[in-house]
Image (tube, helix red, strand yellow):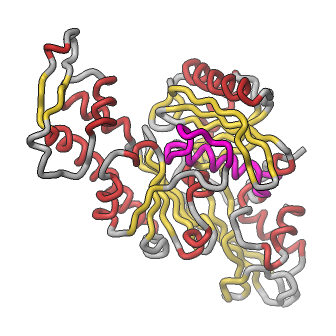
Amino acid sequence: MTLARRSMVGIVDIGTSKVCCFIARRDADGPKVIGIGHQLSRGVRNGVIVDLEATSQSVITAIHAAEEMAGELLQSVVVNLSGGFHASRIVQSEINLNGRQVDDSDLKRVLNLGYHTKEAPGREVIHAIPVGFSIDGSRGIRDPRGMSGVKLAVNMHAVAADSGVLRNINTCLGRCHLDVEAFVASPYAAGLAALVEDETKIGVTLIDMGGGTTTISVFYDSNLVFADSVPIGGNHVTNDIVRGLSTPLTHAERMKTLHGCCITSSTDEREMIAVPQIGEEEDTQSNHVPKSYLVGIIAPRLEETFDMVRDRLDQSGFDKLSGRRVVLTGGACQLAGVRELAAIILDKQVRLGTPLRVAGLAPATSGPAFATSAGLVHFAFSERAETPHPIRSSIGLLDWRGFGLWRWLRENI
């Protein structure tokens, strides 16, 4: 039975900071999560597995908790990819029609030609999304069947990942006795959960701020048109605090959560923070520093992050296409002042995104940090997951329904 036709699915979100497993079933009103497990992530750095044994232990602990809660056993899962994928690109393929009408075989031929465009050695395509057809240079055609011309072309948005990264995730989940049904880039999944329909139509940038990476996706005309990542996340902020204030990692994380901010205020100099020192066991040995010291450590790292995001968008050419709307997801976006700082650096309207259209989430798992996990559930239940073929596994976000092409793609590619 294909993923989209199942009544129950499982997903695993492997991040640098946490591993999360959701088990969900299909209800009349949409997906409902019936099992949740999340665990501190180990063996993952910048979104990539660096210790298979440690990561496998984290994954299997999260899966066991979700299975216990749901009373179900998983055999396969949809899994995210938060690192190891490259800036996406638009690929065009073209075939000759010799003046005749486009039929189903022509459509299938041009789509398959686009998917099989060669990637660099050591890379594999994880998403191949048709974003528009053209006939003899006339663009914006949704369904070319029945139209006549000399040349039929399709633009496809391709996202490729390192083969080694994919194999390591497969091996990790294999040790947990699970098969991988599909790989999904984290910013794509987060967009499926946190964006509303109007945003994806008029243009929006989603920035998923994780522990080890910050990933980017641009949606326009109801399509994913760009995806990329920068190798900076919330853990880098924590490490900066450790080095800057000579405090243990656990205390640095606590200070970031309780007192951290990336926007200065007039009271920062007067507000004092206790800073336990590395190697000191007694609280009496703590230093006391003004909050402005902490803000002075956090702000430059987040400014660097948004500067890199802005540069990637400028280089891609999709900055203007994405409009003036930005949605932030991921655990690192919950730091005080991040929304305001992003608005200043990116010069756009910014909001925080939380999981939408998924029932059964606990309060602790309904915030921005779990947008990717919820998006994986949407992906698993959608038509884009009906087969492992990358073209069919990625077409679901396109607005083909009114043109009769959606069902044909689902059944023939």
Left or right side of 246 for 376: right
Residue drawn at (33%, 30%), measured in percent from left and top?
Answer: 253
The image quadrant of residue 276 is top left
Residue that appears at 47% across and 33% down: 17
| Residue 237 in the image, given as x and y percentages of width and height | 31, 38
Residue 156 drawn at (x, y percent) = 66, 67
Front residue (pair 277, 386):
277
Q: Nearer the viewer, residue 113 or 391?
A: 391
Instruction: Residue lying at the far left in this picture: please name it.
Output: 270
Quadrant location of the N terminus?
A: top right
Q: Is residue 356 left or right of residue 116?
A: left
Q: Is residue 49 above or below residue 395?
A: above
Q: Residue furthest top?
A: 281
Task: Determine whether 227 is above or below 260 in the image.
Answer: below
Measuring from the top left, give residue 6's x and y in whole percent: 85, 45
Q: From the viewer's perspective, is residue 365 above or below residue 277?
A: below
Q: Residue at x 62, y 57 (%)?
A: 192
Residue at figure coordinates x 89%, y 78% from the top left: 103
Q: Is residue 362 magenta?
A: yes
In the rendered image, residue 46, in percent from the top left (x then y), is placed at 45, 37
The dominant secondary structure in magenta is: helix
With 222 as the anchor, is 143 left or right in this view? Answer: right
Image quadrant assignment for residue 222: bottom right
- Is 352 inside the magenta-drawn segment? no
Where does the C terminus fall, quadrant-wise? Answer: bottom right
**Region rendered in magenta:** 359-387
Count of numbered circles in the view: 0
The answer to whether any part of residue 125 appears in the image is yes
Q: For residue 122, say whether it is visible.
A: no
Give the vertical position of 372 relative to 175 (above or below).
below
User: Which of 238/108 is in front?
Assistant: 238
